[in-house]
Structures are given as C-alpha cells and as structure tokens.
Amino acid sequence: MQLTIILLGAVLGLIYGANTDGFIFSSDICLFAGLTLIMPTLFNVKLQDIKLIFEYKTVIMKSLAANFILLPIIALMIGFGTQNFGIAAGLFLLSVLGGGGMVMHWIKKSDADTSIGFILLFINLIFVSLSLLMLHIFGIYTAEYFGESYSDERNLSNFARAVITLLIVIPFIASRVVLFIKPLKNFIEEKRSYISNISLFIILFYLFGLQKSQLLFELYTFEPELIFIAIIAVLAFYFSIFIVSKFIYNLESAQERAAFWHSITRYITLALVLSTFSTNTFGVSMILPIMFAYIVQIPFAIFMDSKIVARRLK
C-alpha cells in the first residue's frame, strides 16, 4: 500500500511540475514533515529513558558506529564506482540518515525493544547536523575526484540549524503539548497510519513537483545511463548494509534487533528533502538514488521482517 502511495505521489508530482511552473522550495515542508511524521513517533519518548543509553551503551555505540562510520564507508566505495558526483552524494546522504518514519513499525513488528528504538530514533534526529556536516566534508574532499567543483553556496551548516528546529525542537515540544490533550493524542495514535500515508503523499507530490525536480526529465534525455547506474548502486548499497548489519548485531537480542532496523532502514523522506535543497551543489542526479531507495527499502524491510519472525518461531 505504501509503495503505491510513494509511486503515485512521485509520478503525479512530476506530471504537475511538467505542466505548470512547479513549486518553489520552502522550508515549511520540513515543518510539515516534522509535525505529521516525526511528532507522533515522539509520544513514547520519555526523558527518564535516557538512563537506557548507559544501560545499553554497547548497543548505542554499535548503532552510531554503523550509521556514521561503516555505512558511509560503504556508500563512498559504491559512490566512487558510479563515477557520478550526484549519485555518490545521494548514496552518502542515505548512509548518514538512519531509521526513518517506518522504523518503529518494523521494530514493533519484529518484537524488538521499542524503548531503545525510540532512543536511537531521537539520537539520529539530533545528529542530523552531524549528517549534514559529513555531507559537506564529502563534497569538499571528493569533488576533485569526480572532476566537479564544490561550492556550498547555501551553507549546509545554516540549513542544519533550520532542520534541527523544524524536525526536532518543534515536533518534540508539540509532542509534549499533545500528551496533555488526551483526545487529540488518542486520535493521532488511532489514525496514525492514515496520517502517515497522507503526509507522505503530500510531501512526495510537493518535492517531485518542485521546479528543480523537472531537471530529472533533462537528465533522462541527455544521460539516461545514470538511471541504470543509480538503480545498481542502490541495490548494492542495501545488500552491503544488510551483510554488515547482520554481522555486527545479535538478532536474538531485542535491543540489538532495534539497532539492526536503524541500520538497514534509511530516513529516505528526510534524505529527499535535503537532496532537493542540495541539487544546486551536487547536481540533480543526487535525487536518483534516494528516489530508487523508496522502491528498494520497503520490499527489503518486508522481506527482512518475515525472515526475523520465521527465525524466532523456530
């Protein structure tokens, strides 16, 4: 169902943009995503759960090492192989954005530790500024390899502050307010799947309807081979992170299963928002791996969930 919504939102957005002047990017889309996709996931985040960071520090450190060291290295290796600055940047951005809107669904479904899952979700959101800094460093040190110039005209560090405010601070404060309004909290939790799907459709329709997104048509016309390269790169990336994650996590542990999901799933919607903002810097091909990640990640997560459940029933 969600894959259908994703494809419908992307296709209709592209059609809308192609037949109109398209949308102009506004950071308000980050606020919308924060309130509709992130805020409901924060209801179960309790300040007293911070003590779990010390109790399960090994799991937390494993997750951080995977998301900010191992996976970026994998993305770099595959990205260099593509010989395209934008595709490599898109993969790298995916590698430093762990978890996502669906991660808690998979954590609950596989009977993993939801408390650790929420803590890791919150940590990954707090570390968005680190993710953007790493993307900036990626641009500085790899542009020459790809024969491109790198100019951070929009200053990713300033954008990081806006992202933290719109995707972390405001949603967290809003979640604390909603907790005091029981009928509203119950309604949001009851209709959460509908709210999530509708929000995802609106966000994708908007992002693919942007004026910049129409450059994908030019890319397809002049460099169609990049479509195939991006698909292969995304498949190689997800296969690689599965191998690494299966090796470093003990799936018999509920806490490590939660960390496992934060490694094999990427925050694709946030990556798409950030990549749309960064196409002037890295090129429109940056959107390609993130676009194909939607198509790969959901079936991949369904397959992994069935394997984990089958293994636990033995």
Image (tube, rainbow, N blue to C red):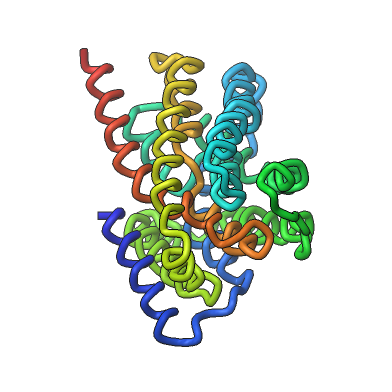
Residue at the spot 56% in from the left edge and 30% down from the top edge: 74
Name the foreground residue: 135 vs 262.
135
Q: How many marks?
A: 0
For residue 179, say whether it is visible.
Answer: no
Percent x, y of residue 159:
73, 60
Q: Quadrant of the C terminus?
A: top left
Res 31 → quadrant? bottom right
Name the foreground residue: 139 vs 262.
139
Residue at the spot 34% in from the left edge and 49% down from the top edge: 295
For residue 108, say whether it is visible.
Answer: yes
Percent x, y of residue 104:
43, 40
Residue at the spot 41% in from the left edge and 61% down from the top edge: 200
Q: Quadrant of the N terminus?
A: bottom left
Q: Is 105 located above or below residue 227 in the figure?
A: above
Percent x, y of residue 309:
26, 24
Name the foreground residue: 22 vs 104.
22
Please identify the residue farthest to the bottom as the structure is shown: 20
Is residue 71 rendered to the left or right of residue 156? Answer: left
Q: Is 180 located above or below residue 233 in the figure?
A: below
Is residue 286 rendered to the left or right of residue 57? Answer: left
Residue at the spot 27% in from the left edge and 33% down from the top edge: 303
Res 55 → quadrant? top right
Percent x, y of residue 259:
50, 27
Name the foreground residue: 114 vs 30.
30
